[in-house]
Image: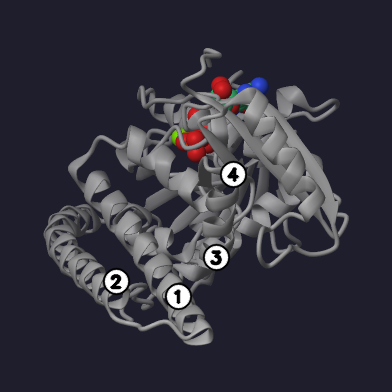
Amino acid sequence: MQNSPKNLVLLIAVNLNRNSEFDEDVAEGIALTESAGFYVAQVLMTNRPKVDPSFFVGSGKLDEIKTLCETLKPVAVIFNHNITPVQERNLDRELKVRIIDRTQLILDIFAKRVTSNEGILQIELAQQSYIATRLVRRWTHLERQRGGIGLRSGSGEKQIELDKRAISDKVTLLKKRLALVVKQRDTQRKARLKSGLPTLSIVGYTNAGKSTLFNALTKAKVYAENRLFATLQTTSRHLFIDETNEVVLSDTVGFIRDLPHKLVAAFRATLEETVYAQLLLHVVDVAHASRIRQMEDVNSVLSEINADTIPQLVVYNKIDLSENVEPHITYSDEQEPLEVFVSAYQNQGLDLLRQAIIEKLEWIKNNNNQQQDLVYEPWKN
Ligand SMILES: Nc1nc2c(ncn2[C@@H]2O[C@H](COP(=O)(O)OP(=O)(O)OP(=O)(O)O)[C@@H](O)[C@H]2O)c(=O)[nH]1
Ligand SMILES: [Mg+2]
């Protein structure tokens, strides 16, 4: 990323309660910031047992940030955390610079790069919902403050009421338009299901190598890149795993730690592809220091969209970056394939992966009596 005054930012990372994966969190914060098109002028790190309710950081750090803002003149101060509306407003007032938190940063990345009609609708919906939560909370706060200092209430509240109404009208409209798109997608999905082919979805933490694996398996050319959220929409392809076994394989958006609930809801249609799969290929960057937590994060988003009952084959990718790991498959005592170790980038272990997929589908066919009639209705409520 080019270093120009237009995109310089200051990144604030608070090590809360001696988090053992703080370094990885900071690295992820830098990657997210760069994916959003900013250049990190400096990372300011600090330790705290818990966050300050007014400013997130303590007063000493706040002074330090202020001085840095004066010298560096960043276009924004980015917090590698989710901050409350009150903290955001206090910081904004104190620092007089745009404050961006982690949710807003992720929304920014999506907003800047999404191209599909559906994606644009989804991101607008997520943004409106995000603004709405901030308005409501800010309103409560203002009301309390007014009461406290005995000012007449009135016009401010009225304005906020009007804002709330405008947002809610916009949200209704966006939801209607999105419902149409979802219906179209539904029809396409039903047609695919009718074909009777097993459907497989590639899921995993952002940047794990899902699209690289998808391309290696299907000879497709979807965009793969060393940046977070390179993929923002779902692509599906028919794939012959061998001469007789054909499946439909989908590549989709990556998951991330603390994915805001609203964002998950807004990306319903994109993640929906995942939910209707018979088998998930859960791609994990085996060389990443936070791989265990990343797997947990992916599984918790899957459970949020009711996809945690779908069988998984774990694909440990990027073995070329780990020492002494050869391509191989691990099995349970019942001979169920559990994990495959591959390098999508270097084409290592992909034959083993194909073999494991066939064995896993066979295993599911023979062992999933209770799952056969399951209808996934993740968005019912
Ligand atoms: N060394 C190595 N790099 C890999 C491997 N697989 C993927 N990569 C690299 O990892 C980066 C991310 O790859 P993608 O395929 O875009 O990852 P993704 O999971 O689709 O990422 P998002 O779409 O952003 O969620 C790219 O720079 C790839 O070249 C691998 O097996 N070994
Ligand atoms: Mg991708």
Q: Which of marks 3 and 1 is nearer the N terminus?
A: 3
The reply to whether the residue tagged 4 has its Cβ within 8 angstroms of ligand 1 is no
| Front-most of residues 341 and 206 | 206
Q: Name the residue under label 3.
A: 86
Q: Is residue 252 shown to the viewer in this render?
A: no
Q: Is the residue under label 2 in contact with that under label 1 (CB below 8 Å)?
A: yes
In this rendering, the answer to whether 16 lies above or below 325 is below
Q: Residue at x 31, y 37 (%)?
A: 114
Query: Could you say where residue 184 lies in the image, as x and y percent from the top left?
Result: 12, 55
Q: In which quarter of the image is residue 24?
A: top right
Q: Mark 4 points at which residue?
A: 95
Q: Mark 2 points at which residue?
A: 160
Query: Could you say where residue 216 lies in the image, as x and y percent from the top left?
Result: 47, 25
| Circle 4 residues within 10 Å: few <14, some 14–19, many ≥20 | some
Q: Of the numbered discs in the image, which one, if any, rests on residue 142?
A: 1
Tag 4: residue type?
Leu
Q: Which residue is drawn at 65% across and 37% down?
A: 11
Q: Which of marks 4 and 3 is nearer the N terminus?
A: 3
